[in-house]
Structure formats: C-alpha cells, structure tokens
Image: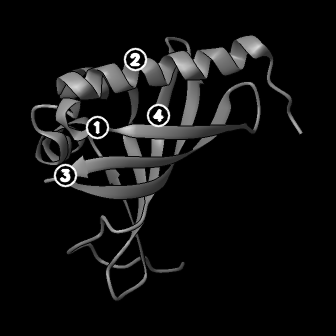
Amino acid sequence: MYQPTAEETQAIEAWFAEFDALAERGSIEGLADLAVFPMNLATDVPGGHAAVRQWTREEYIETMREAIGGGTAGLDLKSTRTPRFLSANLVVVETEATMTVDGQPQSMHYVDLLVRTEDGWAFQTMVQGGWGHGWPTAKRG
C-alpha cells in the first residue's frame, strides 16, 4: 500500500480548502477549473440500479449552478474527509458532510477521485447516491 507523506496529505487538505472556499462563494467556474473533463459520475436511480455518466465542463457548470446556486455560505456545511492514497497521483477521498437546509440538517456521504495533473490536484470522478433522477440505469457489456 502506498503511504503518503505529510506534505502529500497537506496538499489534499489545501486543495479541499480551496474547493470549499470556491463553493461557499458560489464560484462555479472556479470549481470547474479544479476538475478534469470529461468527468465521470456514478450514482443510483431511485427504485432502480446504478447509473453512470460523463459530464463535459458545460454540463458540470449547469448542474452545479442548479445545485449550489449562489454558494454554500448559508448552509452551515461541515465535512469530514478521509483521503486514501492509491499512489502518489491517485487519491480516493471519502466525505461525510452535514448541511442545514430550511432549518433541517441533511447528511451526505460521497467519494471523489482526485488525480494529480501537471497543474496540481483535480477531481475527476464523483460518486454519490441519489443523483440519478431521470438517468438511464447502467448496463453491463
């Protein structure tokens, strides 16, 4: 198993600090700048099975505008992230988060794959249940 250095772990923490600051401000373009496209997504279809897609930068921006609009500042978002380094260039990050929407706490559990590029870390794959409303289910083969 790959054992990251303290500096590698700190680089992931710094990347998420930048990501969270951009999300708080609602900087969707800035968030897109931290990604590699096409972006892979895996989720599930309520009452169905898994669903997978790839998003272009434009699709990501459109979806995130709908999801976080003007930002996450008023949501009292708190996240606990656990990075698992597969290598010096690939990190799976598990996140458990809570946010408050209309006075009600909501929990989220998701995973991101971060890849190290020449320009620094970027997220390339998002995995979270419940996003597949209207998506076709995944097919084998």
Return the mark for residue 18.
2
Q: Nearer the N terminus, badge 3 or badge 2?
A: 2
How packed is label 3: few (under 14 Cα within 10 Å), some, or many (20 or more)? few
**Image quadrant where residue 130 sits:** bottom left
> SS of the residue at dot 3?
strand
Residue placed most toward the observer, 98 or 37: 98
Q: Secondary structure at mark 4?
A: strand
Other-residue count near label 2 (Cα within 10 Å), few / some / many at <14 / 14–19 / ≥20:
some
Q: Position of residue 141 (x, y in %)?
A: 54, 78
Q: Furthest-front residue in view?
A: 103
The amino acid type found where label 2 is placed reads Glu
Q: CA distance from mark 2 to mark 4?
A: 12 Å
* N-terminal-most mark, 2 or 1: 2
Of labels 2 and 4, earlier in sequence is 2
Q: Which badge, 1 or 4, is on the more N-terminal residue? A: 1
User: Mark 2 against mark 1, which lies toward the viewer?
Assistant: 1
Please name which of the two marks, 3 or 2, marks the residue nearer to the observer.
Answer: 3
Q: Residue furthest right?
A: 1
Label 1: which residue?
76
* SS at circle 1: loop
Q: Which residue is mark 3?
A: 101
Report helix, strand or loop for mark 2: helix
Residue under the image location 41 percent in, 38 percent down: 78
Task: Name the residue located 31 percent from the left edge and 47 percent from the top edge.
Answer: 99
